[in-house]
Image (spheres, coloured by chain):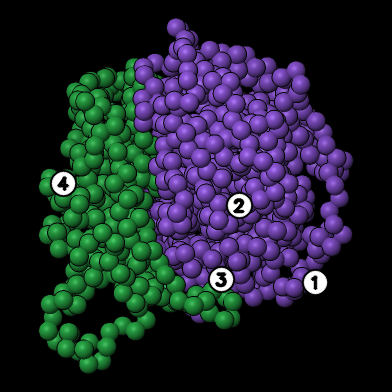
Amino acid sequence: MAERTLRVWRGDAQGGAFQEYKTEVSPGMVVLDLVHKVASEAAPDLACRWNCKAGKCGSCSMEINGKPKLGCMTRLGDYPEGQTITVQPLKAFPVIKDLVTNVKWNYEQNQRITPFTPPARPADGRGLRMKQVDVDRIQEFRKCIECFLCQDTCHVLRDHDKKDKFVGPRFMIRLAQLEMHPLDTVDRIARIRNEYGSGYCNITKCCSEVCPEHIGITDNGIIPLKERVVSRYYDPVAIVWRSIFGGDKRRTEDPPAAK
Amino acid sequence: MALDVSELQTFTHDVVVVGAGGAGLRAAIECRLQGLNTGVVCKSLLGKAHTVMAEGGAAAALGNVDPRDNWKIHFRDTMRGGKFLNVWRMAQLHAQQAPDRIRELEEWGAVFDRTKDGLINQRNFGGHRYPRLAHVGDRTGLELIRTLQDKAIHTGMYVHMECTAVRLLKDGDRISGLLAYWRDTGRFVVFKCKAVIFATGGAGKAWSVTSNSWEYTGDGQRMAYEAGAELMDMEFTQFHPTGMVWPPSVKGILVTEGVRGEGGILLNSKGERFMFNYIPEKFAAETADTVEEGERWLAGDKNARRPPELLTRDVVARAINAEVNAGRGSKHGGAYLDIASRRSADDIKKKLPSMYHQFKELAEVDITKEPMEVGPTLHYMMGGIRVDAETQMTRVPGLFAAGECGAGMHGANRLGGNSLSDLIVFGRLAGVGAAAYIQGLPSEPVIRDDEVKAAVRWARAPLDREAGENPFVLHDEMRTLMGRYVGIWRDKTGLQEGVAELERLEARIANAKATGTSQFNPSWSESIDLHGLVLSAKAVALGALMREESRGGHSREDFLDESKEWVKYNIVIRKGADGSMEVEKVLRSDGPAELVSIANASLEELEGGNG
């Protein structure tokens, strides 16, 4: 048995400070185990979200030694023996208590996005038809567990607090998934540019780096969306082409949100 | 403390759904489609419920991969897997309606893996005769919950996140609302409504080795029981055969049955494929008895029988347990599950990405190169709140239950893949049932102030009392004693001792002390949740003590065989007039002749008969 020091931010919306706790740790433990052990021994009211403890639900997001991570997937063994583990709440969202932040804003963004809108149901009664090769790329985006680590690390949200301008990486890939769905009938490009703020992302790829599901958020999701916006609004050849031959006839434009 | 009920925050809905996993969200969507003002109350953030842990898939006889499949064969498999204790009508409704529910998910945005024809792909799973599980790699639960979540928020319902239900409120016999508290502030909130649908899951957190998260504390079972509903089949607890066993901090985390569905095999420390030694007589005709035949099946030979690794979960869990007890266990006391020598590394990463990821990051094991170590983990409760098969209503007017917290659908043992389909079939039916009930209500139910006050006092007690025991310590004691007395194998003496210990623990839980304020305080929520855990644990132990046979998820060392007598009974548990727990052996009604003949028919008679 070795000993570890957990340095954890304790406090609420009014303020707080780091507190240190020492405890015995065993092999294979993750940071979430350490938080729970300290809670059961010395800090029963230490607030921390968690659920599956297997990297599948995205609840235990926190900043561990300065990096946004899932507590349940971060092994103590990844840090040198004896090194203090410092944990604090996500910086991009208002603190409720200790490690718990108010992430409701994220849920409000999803509410603004028009969901999947299928074509007419095929008459054979056997469901929609799509090739695997056509859904591979959107299945990557659907791996998202909504841990919001990407939102936390995005400078637009974290440092500039432009939550009124940009929906953030999580919802850019939600949009990418809908736009790239082979059977979806809605065209969201105008809203992606005008309302969801695709132009605010300056492709530093920090979001992709922290994604615990290793989704290529920037390369596979955001950049292709930016390209679609460019083709729609700034590419003269594409604009002329569409004026002669028309656009994608399967899709109808998503009307802007009512003010 | 004087409490003015009129000053408590109050929401008014037609129906309140408690729980936002697959069953809760599907129920809530149905309530909205039926035109009801709908509130959802859930303990966690939306989309975090335990449904995300379901990996393998959702069972539905779509017949996309093997056209011989149809609802009758799915029904037959379900009854046989449930050891014929399932409520016949529920197993029938489930098998008949699952395909429509799955195709509907696709129209709501789910993106399942595809067949060559572009239809929903289906995979093999334990106890299912044909490839039947609609899936997305090994993260089907996430796909299901995200799809329902996206659908739900766009239907105009009210979602009350991180809000914990504490007690049901009644007007006479019928439901009038419920009391809950906000986790972030600790403030109480009253929901005034005409019907409540519970979709609160199981109580797996009573055991030490479990795949369940902190939320699985039997809240629904407790509140329903207190309000006068009955619990049924509580003795049937599913130990999933393959949980992680090493390192200690991840012990119990699920390893999907999909590993075996994709060809994975179980080995003991001597390298023997031991499942061939554990084939029950009832399944012998449909199970490969040589390695060679198992290999032909895997290669797609439709005349070969399935390998024994894909027997039902109860059988596989007991087999692993027996190998370990015989001294042939793996290094850390489990069995080896090998996919590395069976499939290419690329295939494994494509078909089982989250297993690859989970073992790599949590156990430093590369499953494309070495075998996993696995052992049984408490995974699911077949028993729960007793409901009417058609409407999902309990015997309390206005109280409904669906999903894991309900009873009847799975009998004595649940087949893998039948849970996700259970959630969407019975979640929907509970919504339909609640709408019909509300339509027929003669008058608006009224909330009584004294009931609210009593519930608030009860819930606040752990914070208000001067001193008491640490709730986390009490919880640990419960988990240890459930593992010891109410585990995979049970016997009379152990169960009696277990019940006695649980009763002593119950008294101590009633005096647990929460430290700190009511704001987002785990020690307070734990103090409240312990009541649901101990109640459910006691119901399991008492049911297990009464049922003197071994069947599915209930194995008695002193009664090793299935009994022809006991299949005629369910064990029903309710709160007696004197407040004590009443346990009754209740005669089951016979299955309708048509269903009995389907369940006993040969496969040849049923193939191609989707009528």
Position of residue B214 relative to residue B423, above or below, is above
* Chain on which label 1 sits: B
Q: CA distance from mark 1 to mark 2?
A: 35 Å
Q: Nearer the viewer, mark 1 or mark 2?
A: 2
- Mark drawn on residue B431: 2
Chain corresponding to green in the figure: A
**In what element is the residue under mark 1?**
helix
Who comes first in sequence, dot 2 or dot 3?
Answer: 3
At label 3, the amino acid type is: Ala
Query: How far apart are the two marked residues, 4 and 1, measured between alpha carbons?
Result: 66 Å
Residue linked to disc 4: A161
**Mark 1 Cα shell of 10 Å, populated few (<14), some (14-19), many (≥20):** few
Residue at point 20% right, 42% down?
Answer: A92
> Which is closer to the viewer, label 3 or label 4?
4
Per the image, the residue denoted by label 3 is B299
Secondary structure of the residue carrying numbered label 2: helix
